[in-house]
Image (cartoon, rainbow, N blue to C red):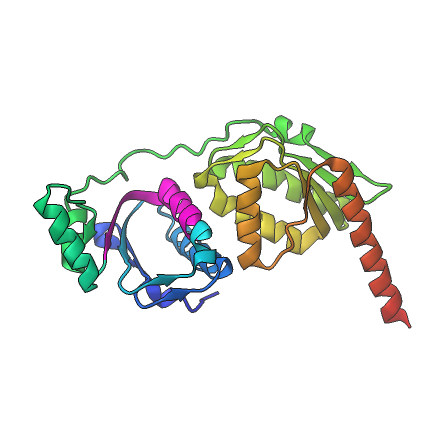
Amino acid sequence: MPTRYDDRIRFIDAEEIMEVDFSNLTLDSSADVNRFYDRIEERIAATEETKWFFLVNYSHMRIDNSAWFAFSRRGKELNLAHSQGSVRFDTSEETRRQIERAAQTEAFDPNLFADRDGAIARIRQLPSQRLRKINHTPTFTRDDVVRRVKFWEDTVIMEVDFSNLALHHSGDVHLFYDYLEEAIKASDRKWFFLVNYENCEIYPEAWVSFAARGKALNIAASLGSVRFSPGSETEEDIRLRAESQNFRPNIRNSRDEALERIEELRAEILASIKARGK
């Protein structure tokens, strides 16, 4: 679905460039940042090309202090996953003076320019990585996935164990979620999701498909999802994406705490049903 950010994201296919326009934009919150980066990821995924040169216009952009962490983290993840070279430009007079001073001291940063033409000229000097074959063969097997999924009929809980697992790319994500979807469809019902993220590592190349598949599965089949022991890196990513994708992260420190939260969700559902029946 198009968003207000779409006009600020465009692709120049002939030169393998994705251009992002932050000019004259104020990002007031972490949620604003996450919504923008979510849309960039979605637009990249729609191209079916994984690698692009990034051309970024920062002219007169403003970021609230509360949004800086999200902006830095999401930008780093996007670059690691999809950039084959990033060049930025800023047409403000302050940037022009900064570049002139840096050039005089031979400390010039070739990836920061005072105009768009200079930035594009720099990109044209960078080598393309698209000729390199991208291998998305799963790094684990379907049997490995099956062992990590349990259905507890008496409590209507599907428990998913991502602990000590690395999701390297979309191939890993699709293998895991294909099985989850098949198993839930066979059960012919919705479930509470109990998810263990302890020591799970989700690589930047996997995050777009992981977020999309997880969101779709939650909408289609979850009565409520609770996560536990995610570890600092994955936890931060989940919390950031929850801000822009309108879901409650429901992250707890242990399995017991997560189960307690599921019982709270169950009680909320029952209370809602009872209220509607009055």
| Region in magenta | 71-89
**185 to the left or right of 54:** right
Residue 192 within the magenta-colored segment of the rendering:
no
Name the image quarter holding the C terminus: bottom right
Residue 84 within the magenta-colored segment of the rendering:
yes
Residue shown at the point (89%, 65%) measured from the top left: 274
**178 to the left or right of 97:** right
Image position, residue 57 (x, y; %):
27, 59
Image position, residue 166 (x, y; %):
53, 30
Camera-nearest residue between 48 and 264? 264
Q: Is residue 70 visible?
A: yes
Camera-nearest residue between 88 and 4? 88
Magenta: main secondary structure: helix
Above-or-below relation of 166 to 96: above
Image position, residue 130 (x, y; %):
28, 40
Residue shown at the point (87%, 41%) measured from the top left: 154
Camera-nearest residue between 156 and 72? 72
Q: Is residue 174 visible?
A: no
Indicate the quadrant where residue 109 lies.
top left
Residue shown at the point (48%, 61%) measured from the top left: 29
